[in-house]
Image: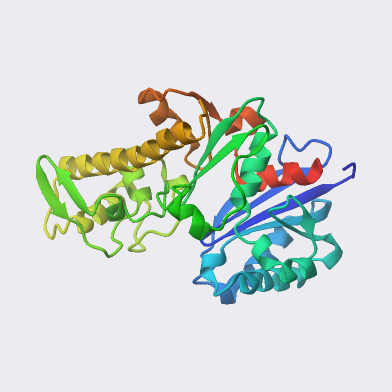
Amino acid sequence: MSQKGSVMISDFGVSTQKFVILDYDSPENPLSYQVLYFPLDEKKDEFSSFIKSYLRSYAEYMIRNYVVSISSESAFNSAKDVVEFIGKTLLEYINKDLLHFYTFENKFISYKEAVENAINVVSTGWWALGTGVSKFLNSDALIVDYSTRCTEIIPTKDGEIAIQPISNHERITKDLLLFNGLLETNAAFIDPQLKINGKKYNLPYHLHANMADVFLITKDITPPTYIVETPDNGPKSREGALIRLKKMMSISGDYDEEFLVNVAKTIKQKALRQILDVIKSKLAEFNLDEIVVAGIGEDILYEYLLENNVNAEIIRASNLAKVTETSSAYFLGWLFIHQ
């Protein structure tokens, strides 16, 4: 597709919204890349203002097309509901001829077509990521997207995704979608009966601390990466994270920082081990010996896999595509420009 100007790509998730702007002439150099925390399930009434503000902030770009993938169906009652909600909101500010929805058939269709075939439009972010990354590969690989609220496993062979398009419901039954993410996941969910120094701790169901707190305490992330809200609306600092972990451990008085750091390190290792076990299983299932790591947690998972001697070549998606940030939105834009 030869065209002057740029294209804006949006991947609308349940809680984080990804936006990328690519120039048609040099898509390898994104003009803008943002991941914004905006929980759709809680702030539907504010979505129109959110979109209006975002579009205005990029009015300087010559945006000729707007491409959308939807990964937020769990915030709505049906696939049609989410397509209509997002589509109608965007059409308040965007010409209908410039708006394109991505499908599992690797096509870009109009809003009207998307509503008529909503099931083929929702939950397509992972398909865009897998299809896009596979275009940069010369070999078969297992793509692992370690993102804000989940980890997605995508096997590829012969330049294509090695499974049929399936729903999130089906993916959670096949260990292809793990609700074990870098930031949003409830830290207690990783191991509700956590063992520390030989003692078992039955952790509370209530969200006191998330994985962002764990990784902040272990110094794997810094406050700017903590884009989600804190469970207690407290500060996104190491001290704030320690206080939240203290609550999770039901400590009412003063806390032993060394103990809480040990708790955080243990939960981190368990979370990453869960992902590693699935990776090993899928490498064997699909007879693969190459892993491509992507997502906001790309660096953390990459280092962990290297340290644990996985019997596979490990590649950063950012190195593969030669971009700083990798996400479904970037690869979706690449697919749109190169269609």
Measured as percent of width and height from the top left, residue 238 is found at 31, 46
Q: Where is residue 133 drawn, in percent x and y?
A: 64, 36
Residue 281's quadrant in the figure? Answer: top left
Q: Which quadrant is the N terminus positioned in?
A: top right
Q: Is residue 300 visible?
A: no
Q: Nearer the viewer, residue 43 or 188?
A: 188
The residue sitting at the bottom extreme is 45
The residue at the point 80 percent across, 64 percent down is 110
Q: Is residue 308 above or below residue 49?
A: above
In the image, taking residue 95 as reference, residue 148 lies left or right, namely: left
Task: Report x, y in % for residue 82.
Answer: 62, 70
Q: Residue at x 44, y 54 (%)?
A: 173
Relative height, residue 10 to residue 44 (above, below): above
- In the image, residue 20 above or below residue 281: below
The residue nearer to you, when weighing 154 against 184, is 154
Give left or right: position of 133 versus 316. Answer: right
Way the structure is coloured: rainbow
**Residue closest to the eye, 225 or 123:** 123
Residue 207 appears in the figure: yes
What is the quadrant of the C terminus in the image? top right
Give the residue at x 79% y 66%: 94
Q: Residue at x 79, y 60 (%)?
A: 109
To which quarter of the image does residue 32 belong?
Answer: top right
Q: Nearer the viewer, residue 218 or 314?
A: 314
Question: Quarter-wise, where is residue 40 in the image?
Answer: bottom right
